[in-house]
Amino acid sequence: MKVRVVVMPKQSVLDPQGVAVRNALKDAGLESVDSVRVGKVLELEFTTPPDEERLEEICRDLLSNPVIEDYAIAYPAAANTEP
């Protein structure tokens, strides 16, 4: 089972890397780009489904900095059980 964790800077936090990327994109000719936020995506693969509460704790305490970052966990969609 794979779980995807997306960690992004909070909207209220300045993202200097995003600003640098936005400026580089404008210099490369993409003048209409307004803003860029740079984050990270972690793909975790488990042999058995993880304990969701424990995974939340790990995302909050280890994989992200809760002062300046938000995270979202994407679990795989349930398998379609229709014939």
Image (cartoon, helix red, strand yellow):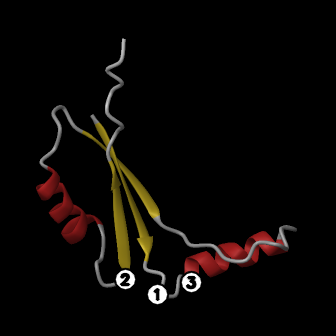
Image spot of residue 9 (x, y percent): 44, 76
Mark 3 neighbour class, 10 Å CA radius: few under 14, some 14 to 19, many 20 or more: few
- Residue at image point 43% right, 80% down: 10
Asked if the residue under mark 2 is in contact with the one under mark 1, i.e. CB atoms within 8 Å, the reply is yes
Mark 2 vs mark 3: in front: 2
> Seen from this angle, which residue lies furthest top?
83
Compared with 18, 46 (above or below) is: above
Q: Which residue is mark 2?
A: 68
Disc 2 residue type? Ile
Q: Which residue is mark 3?
A: 16
Mark seen at residue 13: 1
Q: CA distance from mark 1 to mark 2?
A: 6 Å
Mark seen at residue 51: none
Q: CA distance from mark 2 to mark 3?
A: 13 Å
Viewer-nearest residue: 82 or 35: 82
Mark 2 neighbour class, 10 Å CA radius: few under 14, some 14 to 19, many 20 or more: some
Compared with 54, 11 (above or below) is: below
> Element at badge 2?
loop
Residue 25 is left or right of residue 10, and the answer is: right
Compared with 67, 7 (above or below) is: above
